[in-house]
Image: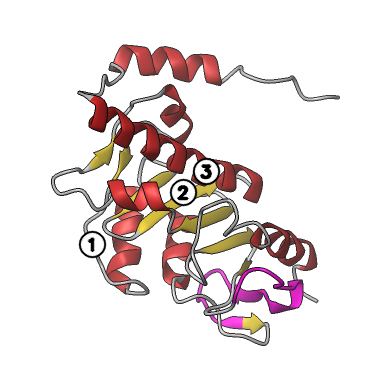
Amino acid sequence: MLLSEERTLIADYCQHFASDGLVVGTAGNISIRAGELVAITPTGLPYVGITPEDICVVNFDTGEQVEGQYRPTSEIHLHLQALQTTGLDSIVHTHSAYATTVASLKGVTELPNIHYITATMGGAIPVTEYARYGSQLLADNVEAALQSKTACLLGNHGSVAAGKDLAEAYTKAQSIEWLSKVYLNARAAGTPRILTPEQMEEASAAIATYGQPHKR
């Protein structure tokens, strides 16, 4: 089976995709690139109980399916263009409630730097214009939004997060949902205080050295 490790990893994450509050029903999707191939979730299948064999494999350059019994997600172009634009190896697309709420607010063009964690995604998270799901326009909107970012919100739709691996992309998707909830709560309670460019630069420098050193 092609990309057995990547397909197994996606299937494992799919088991808690809905319970983590990131998707409803069969909405949302996940992909991992491995060289010239991409493992990606199928279209229209419930996530709980999905198996590695259910995960599709497509060509990175053409999107042509090379293995899998089901058709790949309708957002295949979104994933391929996001992978290409960011140069990262995994994409998580969600329909989480708070992120989608922010992406549906009239006049809101970004999820601002209300917390320093946005620094892990390139700063304030842009909100794209609405485009129909599965459309080339949606994929193009995401590509434009990710030119200098690793995450974006899709107008009246959901979110996209890119990571060097699935763990990183999934964590970013969860962070976007948390940030969106904080932002909406702050707006409801008063006027949100947004971090300055200087504060964000300081946070970015600190995050670069955060965590445990790698073992040799």
Q: Say which label, 3 or 1, has the lower sequence index.
A: 1
Residue furthest to the right in view is 216
Q: Tell me, yes or no, whether the highlighted magenta stretch contains residue 64.
A: yes
Element at badge 3?
helix
Q: Which of 13 and 213 is in front in this view?
A: 13
Residue 86's label in the rendered image is 2
Residue 159, image x, y percentages: 40, 53
Above or below — where is 194 with respect to 34? Answer: above
Q: Nearer the viewer, residue 44 or 7?
A: 44
- Three-letter amino acid code at the position of disc 1: Tyr
Q: Say which label, 1 or 2, has the lower sequence index.
A: 2
Q: In which quarter of the image is residue 118?
A: top left
Residue 174's label in the rendered image is 3
Q: Distance from label 3 to label 1 (Cα)?
A: 22 Å
Residue 167, image x, y percentages: 65, 45
Q: Distance from label 1 to label 2 (Cα)?
A: 21 Å
| SS assignment for the magenta stretch, majority | loop
- Which residue is under mark 1? 130
Residue 197, image x, y percentages: 30, 17
Above or below — where is 18 with respect to 58? Answer: above
- Three-letter amino acid code at the position of disc 3: Gln
Element at badge 2?
helix
- Three-letter amino acid code at the position of disc 2: Thr
What residue is rendered at 61% in x and 17% in y?
A: 209
Residue furthest to the front in view is 189
Left or right of 175 on screen, residue 147:
left
Left or right of 147 on screen, residue 213:
right
Left or right of 163 on screen, residue 66:
right
Q: Nearer the viewer, mark 1 or mark 2?
A: 1
What residue is rendered at 63% in x and 50% in y?
A: 166
Q: Give the range drawn in magenta.
A: 46-65
Q: How crowded is mark 2: few (under 14 residues within 10 Å), some or many (20 or more)?
A: many
